[in-house]
Image (cartoon, grey):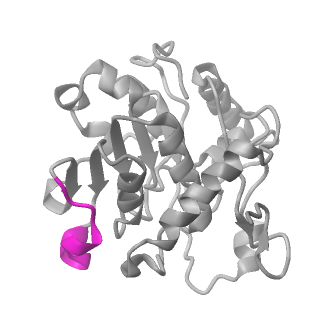
Amino acid sequence: MFRRSPPRAENHDFPSTAPKNHDFGRFSEGRFRHTAFQGRSREWFCANAGSPPALCRAAPSRPDGELLASLRAFADVYRARPARYASNAGGMNVNHAFSLWRAATRLQPGVVVESGVHRGFGTWLLRQARPEARIFALEKSDALKVWGLDYFEASNRTALLMGSEFQDFNDVPWDELLTPADRAGALVVLDDHTDALFRVAGALRAGFRHLWFDDMWEGSHYSLGHLCRAEKQPLRGLAPEDQHADAAWLLEHLVSFHETPAIFDGCATGYPSALLRVS
């Protein structure tokens, strides 16, 4: 969660990370360019997972009663997902899905903005969590033509801004679509592989406060993983001092930060190991 009236939100002179002419899409945004994932091993992904976000959180999250109760509710929904999402290749896995479910059910937003939709599994999951919410689903690719309408949660409460109807999240005139109260209470779901600092700044300028990031890892774009790690290393032309300045700006606006524990951690052992066990 971020501050309602962030200092310098309108006129902040961004560190070098905020792109002036970003190319929004599924895999090529922000300051960094997509790394070729095809053929990469689990070991490669684990090596690029990054460091713990020590700057942004006080302590690692621990399973508790509320978390386990949420997992039980999520498991029922996840088992009942449509067959087309049995394998959500290229989209969020069960760990990310649980995190999104928990955020939506705990916050109880009346409005959800989803930037990066892919095949629509996240949109479907959000509708299960918040049946009455208004959902804005933004996707640059013409996903409706590629996957067909059946792949998306389509109702009079869901606006599918895709293909020719697409607008980048930072460019949508949110003040014309939503009241200040709607924006302050909304959940913004960011799964678009775009510079995280750029997205935070755009959200704050528009009056949003609650942001959920799908990607913390450090393999494809300037993520919260980069911003929140304590030790900074030279990063594709971005000096450590610039990263520290970026992190300081983020922390100045940050009220609370939470990273949901993984259900399965494929990097701890040779096979996925259950971190949360529900009988």
Horizontal and vertical percent position of residue 102: 56, 47
| Residue 133 in the image: above or below residue 193 | above
In the picture, measured across the screen, residue 90 lies left or right of residue 252, that is left
Horizontal and vertical percent position of residue 169: 32, 43
Which corner quadrant of the image does residue 24 belong to? bottom left
Residue 16 magenta? no
- Which residue extends farthest bottom? 39
Q: Which residue is at 64% across, 28% downward?
A: 256
Residue 149 magenta? yes
Q: Which residue is at 19% across, 62% downward?
A: 163
The answer to whether residue 216 is visible is no
| Residue 61 in the image: above or below residue 12 | below
Which corner quadrant of the image does residue 80 belong to? bottom left
Horizontal and vertical percent position of residue 56: 71, 34
The answer to whether residue 227 is visible is yes
Is 93 in front, or is 165?
93
Q: Which residue is at 78% across, 51% downward?
A: 51
Horizontal and vertical percent position of residue 45: 69, 72
- Which residue extends farthest right? 269
Q: Quadrant of the C terminus?
A: bottom right
Is 249 in front, or is 78?
78
Is 165 in front, or is 30?
165
How many circles with numbers are drawn on the protein? 0
In the picture, measured across the screen, residue 216 lies left or right of residue 59, that is left
Q: Quadrant of the N terminus?
A: top right
Q: Which residues are magenta?
A: 142-155
Q: Which residue is at 47% across, 74% downward?
A: 90
